[in-house]
Image (tube, rainbow, N blue to C red):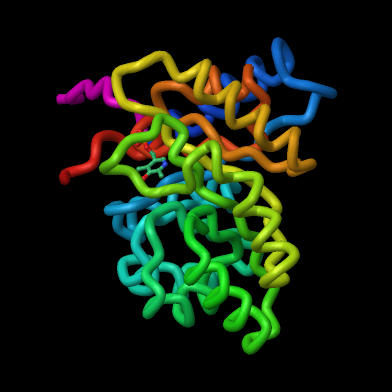
């Protein structure tokens, strides 16, 4: 007996996300640039990441340094063009490990961390692209630089520390329309001549693209609901 199972596979879901990104980019995006998909693989074991790698996806996001260290060194050996993004908070004592493993750190949010990153990136002689996380909805439970402080923070990173900031990232408040928050992030990036914008997750990545995202971070819509 053939047990019919209508659950799409992660590979099928990935294909549909690629299509939706392309459609949104063509409809709204500037200059026909297709935003990059950061496949958020936090809590997902390597065996479930493999089919997505087999589809050709190479950009992934993790939110914990330690968890990422358990999965990605091995996967990076198998696929040398993987681009790994840290999208969760970074403690200063994990900076060395984070710089060693990640290609992009999206969560620079304080001076102490910026200084530690600059020092470690110089020591390791590695290229790591840095984004500043912006607490776009002024939420006390979220990390990130407050919108009013972003311009001075980015300039401080650049001029006082020497750390180049290439992008801005935000997570808008849950349960609210994301568009106005994404528009504000876009505005801040424009003021700073920053070209990379990481905004939009499973439920709102098309809005992110509409507002100029260059990177969208999608987990659930590819891998399915997480256990925790
Ligand atoms: C978990 C996470 C995502 C992905 O969220 P989904 O709703 O599963 O797509 C994106 N960005 C950050 C910072 C996250 O922690």
Near-viewer residue (26 or 57): 26
Q: Main secondary structure of the magenta part?
A: loop
Near-viewer residue (44 or 167): 167
Q: Locate the N terminus and report the quarter of the image it occupies.
A: top left
- Report the residue at 71% width, 10% height from top: 27
Q: Please determine whether, in this image, residue 148 is positioned above or below residue 80.
A: above
Q: How many marks?
A: 0
Regarding residue 16, the answer to whether it shows in the image is: no
Give the percent coordinates (x, y) of residue 23.
Answer: 65, 15
Q: Locate the C terminus and report the quarter of the image it occupies.
A: top left
Q: Please determine whether, in this image, residue 149 is positioned above or below residue 137.
A: below
Asked if residue 115 lies left or right of residue 65, the reply is right
Q: Quadrant of ligand 1?
A: top left
Give the percent coordinates (x, y) of residue 157.
Answer: 65, 63
- Report the residue at 69% width, 20% height from top: 25
Asked if residue 223 lies left or right of residue 160, the reply is left
Q: Which residues are magenta?
A: 1-9
Give the percent coordinates (x, y) of residue 12.
Answer: 45, 30
Q: In the displayed image of the protein, which residue is found farthest to the bottom? A: 123
**Residue 60 magenta-drawn?**
no
Would you identify the image quadrant in which residue 173 lies? top left
């Amino acid at each position: 007996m053939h047990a019919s199972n209508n659950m799409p596979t992660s590979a099928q879901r990935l294909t549909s996300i690629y299509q939706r990104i392309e459609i949104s980019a063509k409809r709204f995006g500037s200059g026909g640039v297709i935003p990059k998909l950061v496949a958020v693989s936090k809590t997902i074991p390597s065996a479930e990441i493999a089919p997505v790698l087999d589809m050709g996806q190479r950009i992934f996001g993790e939110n914990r340094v330690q968890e990422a260290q358990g999965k990605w060194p091995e996967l990076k050996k198998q696929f040398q063009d993987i681009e790994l993004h840290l999208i969760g908070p970074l403690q200063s004592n994990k900076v060395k490990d984070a710089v060693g493993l990640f290609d992009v750190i999206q969560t620079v949010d304080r001076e102490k961390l910026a200084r530690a990153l600059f020092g470690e990136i110089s020591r390791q002689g590695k290229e790591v692209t840095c984004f500043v996380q912006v607490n776009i909805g002024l939420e006390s439970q979220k990390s990130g630089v407050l919108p009013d402080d972003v311009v001075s923070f980015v300039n401080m990173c650049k001029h006082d520390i020497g750390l180049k900031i290439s992008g801005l990232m935000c997570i808008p408040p849950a349960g609210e329309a994301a568009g106005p928050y994404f528009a504000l992030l876009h505005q801040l990036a424009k003021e700073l001549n920053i070209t990379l914008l990481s905004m939009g997750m499973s439920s709102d990545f098309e809005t992110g693209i509409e507002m100029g995202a260059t990177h969208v971070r999608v987990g659930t819509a590819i891998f399915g609901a997480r256990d925790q």
